[in-house]
Image: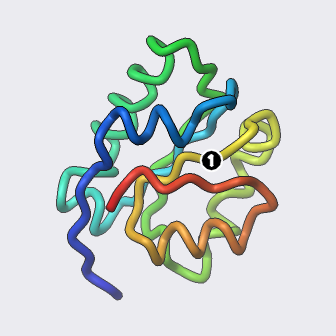
Amino acid sequence: MIRSITRQKPEEEIQRLLEGAARIFIIGCGTCATLTRTGGEPEVKAMSEKLQEAGKLVTGHVVLPVACDHLTGEALKGYGGWIEQAELLLVMTCAFGVQTVARQLKKIVIPALD
């Protein structure tokens, strides 16, 4: 497994990246992003609240056990309806997790972390 150190993008940058999108699904990671406190359950919930306060509809969220794992697609199947409702995915994982999610789903993927 890859160990990544991540940090959240500035709020203004995230808002700019999400401009024009009204419905968002958030994906976090239970390993590296949880360890660095940038994309675990508390951070995903906080991001959901911030986006809702900014007028966005968060269709749902999930913290995957390992976002960069080859089973990511399987783990996301249970969230298919909520993901389908979203215009894009805000992914709070390392770059490899973002790439893995993007390969698994036919949605626009926006990275929330550097």
Residue 94: % across, % down: 38, 68
Q: Is residue 83 above or below residue 59?
A: below
> Left or right: where does residue 106 sit relative to residue 69?
right
Please say if 77 is above or below 87: below
Is residue 5 rendered to the left or right of residue 92?
left
Element marked by disc 1? strand
Specify whether 81 is left or right of 10. Answer: right
Residue annotated with mark 1: 89
Residue 62 position (above or below residue 31)? above
Q: Residue furthest bottom?
A: 1
Q: Residue at x 75, y 63 (%)?
A: 105
* Viewer-proximal residue among 17 and 88: 17
Image-based side of 98 in relation to 28, left or right: right
For image coordinates 41% across by 61% down, the residue present is 93
**Height in image: 20 above or below 88?**
above
- Image coordinates of residue 2 in percent, x first then y, are 32, 86
Residue 74 screen position, x and y as percent: 69, 68
In the rendered image, the quadrant that contains the N terminus is bottom left
Quadrant for the C terminus, please: bottom left
Q: Residue at x 42, y 50 (%)?
A: 112
* Scheme of colours in the image: rainbow
Q: Amino acid at mark 1?
A: Leu
Q: Residue at x 70, y 74 (%)?
A: 103
Q: Position of residue 107 (x, y in %)?
A: 76, 54
Residue 20: image quadrant is: top right
Crowd tier of the residue under label 1, counting other residues whose Cα lies within 10 Å: few below 14, some 14–19, many 20 or above: many
The tally of labels here is 1
Of 89 and 2, nearer the camera is: 89
